[in-house]
Image: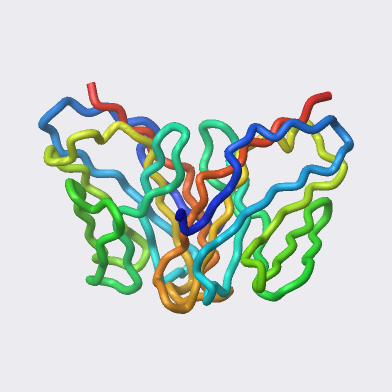
């Protein structure tokens, strides 16, 4: 079992729709959760961090964390073609010195 | 401007050569990391460092070496022992290695290495 799992996609959504990206993790003591956006040929950009159960909203982005079920999700409201990218989920815990990254979900937003 | 810089952006290496990738940060972060990304794959950790003159191997350290002589700098050398070095190399930094909010990692723009 991979430590951090994401559906590779592509996830295709029409412009203006809500895109829902999901991530599951295996380490129950994980404490920190991050979403990165990576455009083709570019480096990852941190877009959301979440540490407590529940929702965290930032503009059009909402991160949702459920530690009991060991999943974290990212919702993108009013999706735009400029949101088309690969989204990486990363998980950290106090037990390790490093983040564990998923392989990413490719999102395509079509006009 | 605070940030992480990597140079060069593109690097071409002949087989048998060692090459060094530069990474500098002015964020006053203690921890620095090197990752490798191959097409269609996730990030794989090569080396990381929390303090000057100390670093640890990541998951794929063979064929690579690093140094941390200054807090701001963490260069990566790809040696001739690395059999398949063609990849996108990413440097990152965070305030601390610890879990929680202190290990938000921020990435540099990357170096794309190609072996000729």
Look at the picture and state if A83 lies above or below A51.
Answer: above
Left or right placement of residue B61 versus residue A31 in this view: left
How far across and how far down the image is residue A36, in percent? 60, 51
Return the residue nearer the eye: A69 or B34.
A69
Look at the picture and state if B38 lies above or below A55.
Answer: above
- Image-quadrant location for residue B81: top left
How far across and how far down the image is residue B46, in percent? 30, 53
Q: Residue at x 55, y 46 (%)?
A: A44
Q: Residue at x 62, y 45 (%)?
A: A87
Left or right placement of residue B77 versus residue B35 in this view: left
How far across and how far down the image is residue A77, in percent? 85, 47
Q: Residue at x 30, y 31 (%)?
A: B86
Image quadrant holding the N terminus of chain A, namely: bottom left
Instruction: Tell me how the rendering is colored.
Output: rainbow
Left or right placement of residue B22 versus residue B40 in this view: left
How far across and how far down the image is residue B67, in percent? 22, 60
Return the residue nearer the eye: B29 or A70.
A70
Look at the picture and state if B70 lies above or below A80.
Answer: below
Left or right placement of residue B14 versus residue A98 in this view: left
Return the residue nearer the eye: A25 or A84.
A25
Q: Residue at x 65, y 32 (%)?
A: A10
The residue most toward the top is: B116
Q: How many marks?
A: 0
């Amino acid at each position: 079992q991979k430590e951090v799992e994401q559906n590779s996609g592509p996830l295709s959504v029409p412009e203006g729709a809500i895109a829902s990206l999901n991530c599951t993790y295996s380490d129950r003591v994980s404490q920190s959760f991050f979403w990165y956006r990576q455009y083709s040929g570019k480096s990852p950009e941190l877009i959301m961090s979440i540490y407590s159960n529940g929702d965290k909203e930032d503009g059009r982005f909402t991160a949702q964390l459920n530690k009991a079920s060991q999943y974290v999700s990212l919702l993108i409201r009013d999706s735009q073609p400029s949101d088309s990218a690969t989204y990486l989920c990363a998980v950290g815990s106090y037990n390790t010195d490093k983040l564990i990254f998923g392989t990413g979900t490719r999102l395509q937003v079509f006009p | 401007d605070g940030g992480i810089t990597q140079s060069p952006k593109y690097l071409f290496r002949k087989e048998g050569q060692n090459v060094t990738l530069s990474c500098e940060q002015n964020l006053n972060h203690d921890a620095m990391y090197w990752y490798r990304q191959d097409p269609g794959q996730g990030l794989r950790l090569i080396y990381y460092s929390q303090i000057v003159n100390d670093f640890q191997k990541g998951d794929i350290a063979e064929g690579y070496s690093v140094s941390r002589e200054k807090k701001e700098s963490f260069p990566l050398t790809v040696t001739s022992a690395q059999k398949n070095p063609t990849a996108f190399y990413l440097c990152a930094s965070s305030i601390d290695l610890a879990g929680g909010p202190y290990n938000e990692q921020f990435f540099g723009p990357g170096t794309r290495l190609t072996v000729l």
